[in-house]
């Protein structure tokens, strides 16, 4: 069966099928509504709980491995928790995404993995920055060695398959200054309203940089992933004063 990939921000009947399955799987531990069409933070939290219980990669993204866990779970009647209608909708939604979308989806998947391990990875201005393995995780040594804001976004771009936003061919170096210098040299500065998941937001204070967790929309303030000396987490893009937005080249 061809499985669709669902993640934060998705909407539609396939999400409703997912939440029905999550409620059968998690019972009273589920935070989302039993049948909702928007993949919000509550759904993401439930997905990560299911992934943690199943001992698969905890990234909050529903791909083949997570669907397989759900499909193998049975109701008291012996039927799969994913009903025939849900499977049809999921199969219908499964389609090849444009290359740029695949890159950006991988970046967000890496963000979710870091979020799930935020209390194990210290803030540290060390180089070379960590390198994600092909399965979307960091080695124990990279995890405990830590990273900083520019190191994290560079590592995520490398894992996603984007071009090095520092313009250094991923040589293991680069800081906020090289990110900004490359953005100016390549004229990849854009308006926040044009930004997509994976693009970078630069801030006036402390030379901080964060990375979009979702696409921006007209009149919307998107969410960014931030790994800094303050707690790693998701914040509104305007939680600090933005000095520039850098488009990641995919």
Image (cartoon, rainbow, N blue to C red):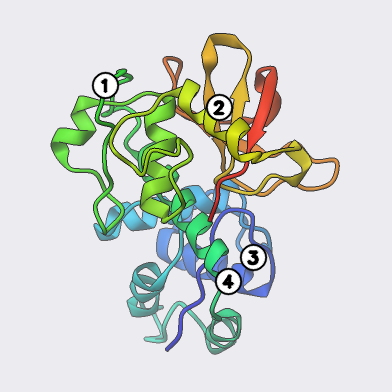
Mark 3 crowd level (few <14, some 14–19, many ≥20, 10 Å Cα): some
Q: CA distance from mark 3 to mark 4?
A: 29 Å
Sequence-wise, the earlier of marks 1 and 4 is: 4
Mark 2 crowd level (few <14, some 14–19, many ≥20, 10 Å Cα): many
| Quarter occupied by residue 120 | top left
Residue 71, image x, y percentages: 39, 79
Q: Residue 32 has which mark?
A: none
Q: Going by the image, does 241 lie left or right of 7?
A: right
Check if mark 3's residue and mark 4's residue have beta carbons within 8 Å: no
Q: CA distance from mark 1 to mark 2?
A: 19 Å
Q: CA distance from mark 3 to mark 2?
A: 44 Å
Check if mark 1's residue and mark 4's residue have beta carbons within 8 Å: no
Identify the secondary structure beneath mark 1. loop
Q: Residue 98 has which mark?
A: 4
Which residue was labeled with disc 1? 126
Check if mark 3's residue and mark 2's residue have beta carbons within 8 Å: no
Q: CA distance from mark 1 to mark 4?
A: 34 Å
- For discs 2 and 4, the disc positioned in front in the rendered view: 2
Sequence-wise, the earlier of marks 3 and 1 is: 3
């Amino acid at each position: 069966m061809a499985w669709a990939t669902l993640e934060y921000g998705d909407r539609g009947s396939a999400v409703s099928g997912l939440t029905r399955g999550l409620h059968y799987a998690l019972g009273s531990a589920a935070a989302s509504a039993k049948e909702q069409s928007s993949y919000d933070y509550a759904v993401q939290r439930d997905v990560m709980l299911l992934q943690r219980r199943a001992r698969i990669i905890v990234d909050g993204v529903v791909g083949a491995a997570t669907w397989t866990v759900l499909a193998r779970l049975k109701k008291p009647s012996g039927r799969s928790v994913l009903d025939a209608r849900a499977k049809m909708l999921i199969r219908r939604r499964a389609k090849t995404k444009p290359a740029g979308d695949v890159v950006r989806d991988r970046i967000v998947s890496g963000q979710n993995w870091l979020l799930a391990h935020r209390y194990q990875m210290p803030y540290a201005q060390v180089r070379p920055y960590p390198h994600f393995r092909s399965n979307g995780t960091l080695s124990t040594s990279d995890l405990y060695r830590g990273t900083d804001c520019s190191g994290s976004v560079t590592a995520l771009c490398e894992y996603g398959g984007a071009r090095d936003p520092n313009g250094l061919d991923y040589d293991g170096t680069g800081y906020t200054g090289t990110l900004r210098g490359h953005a100016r040299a390549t004229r990849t500065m854009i308006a926040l309203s044009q930004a997509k998941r994976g693009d970078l937001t630069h801030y006036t204070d402390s030379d901080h940089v964060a990375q979009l967790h979702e696409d921006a929309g007209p009149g919307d303030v998107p969410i960014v992933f931030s790994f800094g000396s303050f707690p790693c987490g998701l914040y509104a893009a305007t939680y600090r004063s933005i000095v520039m937005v850098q488009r990641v080249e995919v």
